[in-house]
């Protein structure tokens, strides 16, 4: 008799805008088999990345944490002994209580991020924070620069339906590599190319997997995207391709912009970007002359000190040309404004005290080493709960982060799936569930679907979800809120209903809700997201963040990057690796095998000048630190002076035990802060 395979609906929880709708094969209630994309979902369309296709390799990994551990040796030694859950939570609650009694409640800093994107499991840590008046967290490590840049002009974080790429005549992926990081984008690009003969342009400092399949790849120097955007708009005004009627109706000051851009011609941009005048002219003619031109703005080019200004300049392009008006035209970064969540229940917003300090998560090294710029007048941090993030590896200026975690007067509890570098710094390690082992609620950044990921399999004995850990600590600490008394699915249902959406039963039955706004709203034909409905060529940067003084009045190249110098002549980009997602999947054998080892991608001319060949050991460094990797030589598509280190490898994968973020800076990008991972000047030499 043929055995019928059982597939259940789920949702990918990882830190990716695609939030793919999944079909997961369930085997005997405790294991999974194959994982595939849901064909019925109009965005996922049956396509998912290879990382998630082989999720059985991760969820059933023999190295998963499955019991609470207490540190028995020096911090970082990896010496632990198993303990029970009650003892573990008692110790954590006791440490938090002691820190509060000695130093005040702000001495406790719950720290989290996007290891899961589920709203209940990810964001419930805030409910404990607010109930106990622990220090708050400013979330800057991923999107805050882009948020500022997009909102500056557009006013709200949404845009034309991403599925409209399929009816575009030109698709521009600017500062992203969706082949590796948002594979579904390529599905809709392929549809446009096949059905309409659409052109595909990629703007990225090196030849990514996405750039390799483009009709045109422009490789500007890192941090110069704003100059390219300004030159494109200069050509639009110069050649009569600016839509003056559209700007008169929808923009704030087109006359000032036109006057400002008169000197921002392709020759000016060529000197800044390193592109040729001919390349810039050709791209400008293609973009300005194609009404159905869709810009898919990535996250990469904004991770720079001038990233907000650069993204704002890019969003000005469809405003000058009026491309927003057209189906398949305009620009898109993220859709988060469409969901209108009421997160009072999940986050305990009714308990939030805004007088409690908030510290920059990207500057965790500064926080833990006592930098008063972050601590303010409050106490040093003496106790932490860390969920969904691996700051020892992913945070910038990691040598400073390492020094902060080395403090003996710091208590650390890490709730994790694997023994990460951060977990090895913990006093107490708690084993965490994975997404198929608990209930959660998801929104998509890269499309428009609300989904529920219901528990499909039992976790390994000993693993508990984030929600369960927060509940357990709340009981011991005396925290009171209705969210501490509810199951995860009860919170999912209540949050849906309190946000104006159908309840969990309906969403589970339908598998998803498509909440994409009507075209009038998505294309801003009923007005942009500012009170007067007009796009801002001249943004109110002061309203977006405290570090606004250096922001340009009008779109421009903002010359505030970590420029190459004689001492540090190379500009480094730390791009994602295809087989990893931040530090998730770095533990899987297939991912490790396919990525090989940490390496630096060099321009061939640079490699020859330095006497380096493929595979040579190479040392990179700056004032913050040094690392050793192996050389790879680019065959084109990368300017001299640009180097790329792909992937956030575990530090132990590097020869000296020091990872790439030892080189990146924790300088907060204006106007609202943000990590500048792709804005780093370094020196390079052959390793001795």
Image: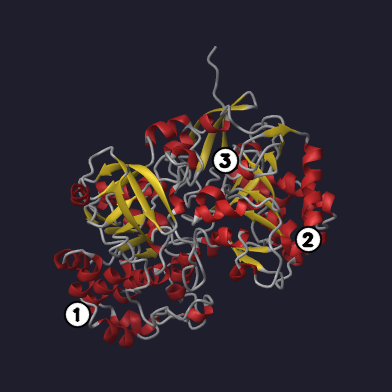
Q: Quadrant of residue 162?
A: bottom left
Q: Tell me whether circle 1 and circle 2 mark residues in contact (CB < 8 Å).
A: no
For the residue carrying disc 1, how many other residues have a C-alpha within 10 Å: few (<14), some (14-19), or many (20+)? some
Residue at position x 46%, y 81% in the image: 549
Q: Note whether 496 is above or below 421 in the view shown.
A: below
- Quadrant location of the N terminus in the rendered image: top right
**For discs 3 and 1, the disc positioned in front in the rendered view:** 3
Identify the residue position indicated by label 1 in the image: 238
The kind of secondary structure element at disc 3 is loop
**For discs 1 and 2, the disc positioned in front in the rendered view:** 2
> Can residue 19 be seen?
yes
> Relative to the observer, which residue lies in front, 593 or 396?
396
Q: Note whether 218 is above or below 460 in the view shown.
A: below
Residue 424 drawn at (x, y percent) = 61, 41
Q: Note whether 272 is above or below 657 in the view shown.
A: below
> Can residue 485 be seen?
no
Task: Looking at the image, tell me whether mark 2 or mark 3 is earlier in sequence order.
Answer: 2
Q: Disc count in the image?
A: 3
Task: Looking at the image, tell me whether mark 3 or mark 1 is earlier in sequence order.
Answer: 1
The kind of secondary structure element at disc 2 is helix
**For discs 2 and 3, the disc positioned in front in the rendered view:** 3
Residue 464 drawn at (x, y percent) = 71, 39
- Quadrant location of the C terminus in the rendered image: top left
Q: Which label number is shown at residue 192?
A: none
Identify the residue position indicated by label 3 in the image: 420
Residue at position x 37%, y 72% in the image: 560
Image color mode = secondary structure
Residue at position x 57%, y 32% in the image: 59
Residue 596 drawn at (x, y percent) = 37, 34
Identify the residue position indicated by label 2 in the image: 132
């Amino acid at each position: 008799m043929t055995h019928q395979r059982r597939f259940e609906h789920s949702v990918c929880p990882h830190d990716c805008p695609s939030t793919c709708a999944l079909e997961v094969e369930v085997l005997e209630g405790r294991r999974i088999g194959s994982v595939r994309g849901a064909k019925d979902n109009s965005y996922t369309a049956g396509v998912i990345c290879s990382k998630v296709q082989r999720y059985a390799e991760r969820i059933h990994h023999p190295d998963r944490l499955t019991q609470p551990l207490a540190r028995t040796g020096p911090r970082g030694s990896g010496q632990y002994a198993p303990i029970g859950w009650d003892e573990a939570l008692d110790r954590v609650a006791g440490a938090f209580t002691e820190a509060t009694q000695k130093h005040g409640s702000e001495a406790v800093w719950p720290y989290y991020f996007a290891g899961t994107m589920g709203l209940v499991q990810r964001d419930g840590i805030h409910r404990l924070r607010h109930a106990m008046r622990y220090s708050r967290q400013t979330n800057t490590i991923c999107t805050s620069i882009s948020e500022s840049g997009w909102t500056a002009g557009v006013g709200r974080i949404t845009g034309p339906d991403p599925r409209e790429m399929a009816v575009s005549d030109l698709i521009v992926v600017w500062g992203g590599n969706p082949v590796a990081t948002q594979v579904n984008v390529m599905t809709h690009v392929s549809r446009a190319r096949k059905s309409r003969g659409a052109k595909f342009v990629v703007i990225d400092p090196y030849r990514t997997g996405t750039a390799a399949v483009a009709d045109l790849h422009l490789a500007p120097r890192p941090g110069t995207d704003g100059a390219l955007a300004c030159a494109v708009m200069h050509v639009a005004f110069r050649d009569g391709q600016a839509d003056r009627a559209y700007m008169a109706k929808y923009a704030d000051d087109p006359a000032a912009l036109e006057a400002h851009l008169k000197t921002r011609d392709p020759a000016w941009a060529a000197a800044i970007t390193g592109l040729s005048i001919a390349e810039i002219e050709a791209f400008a003619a293609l973009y300005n002359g194609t009404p159905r031109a869709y810009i898919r703005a990535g996250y990469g080019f904004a991770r720079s000190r001038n990233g907000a200004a650069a993204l704002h300049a890019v969003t000005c392009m469809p405003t000058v040309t009026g491309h927003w008006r057209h189906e398949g035209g305009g620009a898109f970064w993220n859709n988060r404004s469409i969901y209108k969540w009421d997160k009072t229940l999940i986050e305990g917003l009714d308990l939030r005290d805004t007088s409690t300090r908030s510290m920059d998560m990207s500057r965790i090294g500064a926080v833990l080493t006592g930098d008063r710029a972050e601590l303010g007048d409050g106490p040093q941090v003496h106790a932490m709960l860390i969920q969904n993030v691996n700051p020892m590896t992913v945070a910038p200026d990691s040598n400073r982060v390492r020094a902060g975690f080395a403090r003996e007067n710091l208590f650390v509890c890490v709730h994790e799936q694997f023994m990460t570098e951060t977990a090895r710094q913990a006093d107490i390690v708690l084993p965490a569930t994975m997404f198929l082992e608990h209930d959660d609620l998801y929104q998509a950044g890269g499309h428009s679907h609300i989904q529920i990921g219901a528990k499909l399999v039992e976790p390994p004995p000993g693993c508990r979800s984030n929600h369960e850990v927060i509940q357990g600590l709340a009981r011991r600490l005396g925290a009171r809120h209705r969210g501490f008394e509810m199951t995860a699915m009860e919170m999912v249902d209540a949050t849906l209903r309190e946000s104006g959406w159908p309840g969990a039963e309906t969403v589970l039955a339908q598998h998803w809700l498509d909440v994409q706004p009507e075209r009038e709203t998505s294309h801003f034909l009923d007005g942009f997201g500012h009170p007067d409905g007009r796009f801002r060529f001249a943004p109110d940067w002061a309203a977006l963040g405290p570090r606004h003084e250096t922001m340009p009045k009008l779109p421009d190249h903002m010359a505030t990057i970590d420029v190459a110098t004689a001492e540090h002549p190379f500009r480094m980009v730390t791009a994602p690796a295809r087989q990893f997602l931040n530090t998730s999947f770095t533990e899987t054998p297939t991912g490790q095998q396919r990525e090989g080892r940490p390496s630096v991608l060099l321009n061939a001319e640079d490699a020859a000048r330095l006497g380096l060949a493929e595979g040579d050991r190479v040392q990179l460094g700056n004032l913050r630190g040094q690392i050793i990797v192996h050389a790879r030589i680019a065959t084109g598509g990368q300017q001299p002076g640009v180097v790329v280190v792909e992937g956030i490898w575990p530090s132990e994968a590097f020869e000296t035990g020091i990872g790439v973020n030892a080189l990146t800076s924790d300088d907060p990008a204006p106007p609202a802060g943000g990590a500048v991972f792709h804005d780093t000047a370094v020196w390079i030499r052959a390793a001795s």
